[in-house]
Image: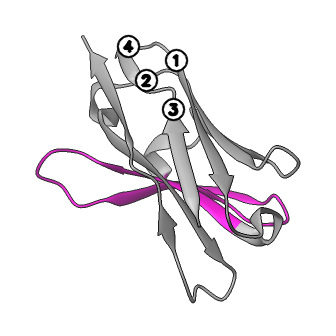
Amino acid sequence: QVQLVESGGGVVLAGGSLNLSCAASGFPFSSYYMSWYRQAPGNERELVARITSSGRANYQESVRGRFTISRDNVKQTTALQMNDLKLEDTGEYYCHSMPQDRTVGYWGQGTQVTVSS
């Protein structure tokens, strides 16, 4: 049974930091791409960052230089370090996993991030 469990969300002032974590189980973690998506009220879910099985990371332009995605293949976790948070970073953040061939995809339940002024 695949499980992706996010944690680390909360309320933070603009300019602050949060670290999100996703604990994974039930699939071959080290060979899967891991991603973070977010969804703000009234908006579509969007890709924030992705890390490949080899550790290469890609970011949405709006978060590049502020967010860092990482993975630990031994602990089967992926993290998203978010610095210099902005009001527009507010949303529900979801962990996602998929193999390189993208034949399947799994979602976590989400964790809320609220950035206040």
Q: Is residue 25 above or below residue 22?
A: below
Mark 3, residue position: 7
Q: Is residue 92 above or below residue 3?
A: above
Amino acid type, mark 3: Ser
Element type where label 3 sits in the image: strand
Amino acid type, mark 4: Val
Q: Nearer the viewer, residue 70 or 117?
A: 70
**Label 3 Cα crowd, 10 Å radius (few <14 / some 14-19 / many 20+):** some
Specify whether 41 is left or right of 47.
left
Contact, CB < 8 Å: mark 2 with mark 1? yes
Locate residue 79, reporting x and y percent.
65, 39
Does the magenta-highlighted stretch encompass residue 16? no
Q: Of the numbered discs in the image, which one, if any, rests on residue 12?
A: 4
- Give whichever of discs 4 and 2 has the lower sequence position: 4
Residue 91 picture quarter? top left
Contact, CB < 8 Å: mark 4 with mark 2? yes
Which of label 4 and label 2 is nearer to you? Answer: 4
Look at the image and tell me in which quarter the N terminus lies.
Answer: bottom right
Q: Of the numbered discs in the image, which one, if any, rests on residue 76?
A: none
Contact, CB < 8 Å: mark 1 with mark 4? yes
Locate residue 77, reporting x and y percent.
71, 45
Distance Cα–Cα, label 1 vs label 3 = 14 Å
Q: Residue furthest front?
A: 1
Q: Is residue 85 above or below residue 65?
A: above
Magenta residues span 33-60
Distance Cα–Cα, label 2 vs label 3 = 17 Å
Mark 1, residue position: 17
Amino acid type, mark 1: Ser
Element type where label 2 sits in the image: loop
